[in-house]
Image (cartoon, rainbow, N blue to C red):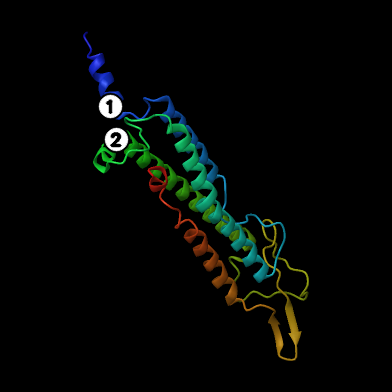
């Protein structure tokens, strides 16, 4: 049967971004850099040793800050360089990075390309946040594994040093049990742990919210 190959090819070429070698190269570089983001973690998981509350908070905050800086600086600049290097010699046409007419840009493939890049970046950030929060939550659950279902009537036993409750992996926190003239109490207020963990959780999410849109850095 007859088939309108030329017409179908023209329609495909009109709508596809994969019609220029330079564009294909740029897409490959963008996806490579976006994939690298998903291999990072917003938290230091798992921890190698148990820590005091302040040290744990500092360690996790530093990990979050480092990834946040990577996203806002290294990642954005690497993507910008990859795209501009790939498309700099294309010249006038669908992928003109030097286009100055807003109406022309809106109907160009360059606009579609930048939309695709934006969605790739958003997907990478979403995966980074979700995977990091799941790993962080699981680390906390593993540390509390043996005590999650303790009953109110539970009695510790005769030894204050040896604990029958063992975490699945490494213990997370170092806390001292103090006996002095005021009685028996912990060296750290237990309510501070909940506040600190929720704060770290929120900081992890917020660290990905100030990543710039790449479009304005490409279309100068």
- 48 and 164: which is toward the camera: 48
Residue 42 lies in quadrant: bottom right
| Left or right, residue 89 beside residue 190 | left
Q: Residue furthest top?
A: 1
Q: Position of residue 197 (x, y in %)?
A: 56, 67
Which label lies toward us, 2 or 1? Answer: 2
> Which residue is tagged 2?
108
Question: Which of the image's four quarters has the C terminus?
Answer: top left
For residue 108, above or below residue 204: above
- 85 and 161: which is toward the camera: 85
Q: Position of residue 144 (x, y in %)?
A: 62, 63
Q: Position of residue 15 (x, y in %)?
A: 29, 29
Q: Residue 14, labelled with which disc?
A: 1
For residue 164, above or below residue 28: below
Q: Residues within 10 Å of mark 2 (few under 14, many from 20)?
A: some
Q: Residue 204, labelled with which disc?
A: none
Q: Give the alpha-carbon distance from disc 2 to disc 1, as whole Å.
A: 10 Å
Label 1 element class: helix
| Residue at the image point whose x is 39% and y is 25% from the top | 20
Q: Is residue 34 visible?
A: no
| Residue at the image point whose x is 38% and y is 48% from the top | 216
| Residue at the image point whose x is 59% and y is 71% from the top | 193
Residue 154 lies in quadrant: bottom right
């Amino acid at each position: 049967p007859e088939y309108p190959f030329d017409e179908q090819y023209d329609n495909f070429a009109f709508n596809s971004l994969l019609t220029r070698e330079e564009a294909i190269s740029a897409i490959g570089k963008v996806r490579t850099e976006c994939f690298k983001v998903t291999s990072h973690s917003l938290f230091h998981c798992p921890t190698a040793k148990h820590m005091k509350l302040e040290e744990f908070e500092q360690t996790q905050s530093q990990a979050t800050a480092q990834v946040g800086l990577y996203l806002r600086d290294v990642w954005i600049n690497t993507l910008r360089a990859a795209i501009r290097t790939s498309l700099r010699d294309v010249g006038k046409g669908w992928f003109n990075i030097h286009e100055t007419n807003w109406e022309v840009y809106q109907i160009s493939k360059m606009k579609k390309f930048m939309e695709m890049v934006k969605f790739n970046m958003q997907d990478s950030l979403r995966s980074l946040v979700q995977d990091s929060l799941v790993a962080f939550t699981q680390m906390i659950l593993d540390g509390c594994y043996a005590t999650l279902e303790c009953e109110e009537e539970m009695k510790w036993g005769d030894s204050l040093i040896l604990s029958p409750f063992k975490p699945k992996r490494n213990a997370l926190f170092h806390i001292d049990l103090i006996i002095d003239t005021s009685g028996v109490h912990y060296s750290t207020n237990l309510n501070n742990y909940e506040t600190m963990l929720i704060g770290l959780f929120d900081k992890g999410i917020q660290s990905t919210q100030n990543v710039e849109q790449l479009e304005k850095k490409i279309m100068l």
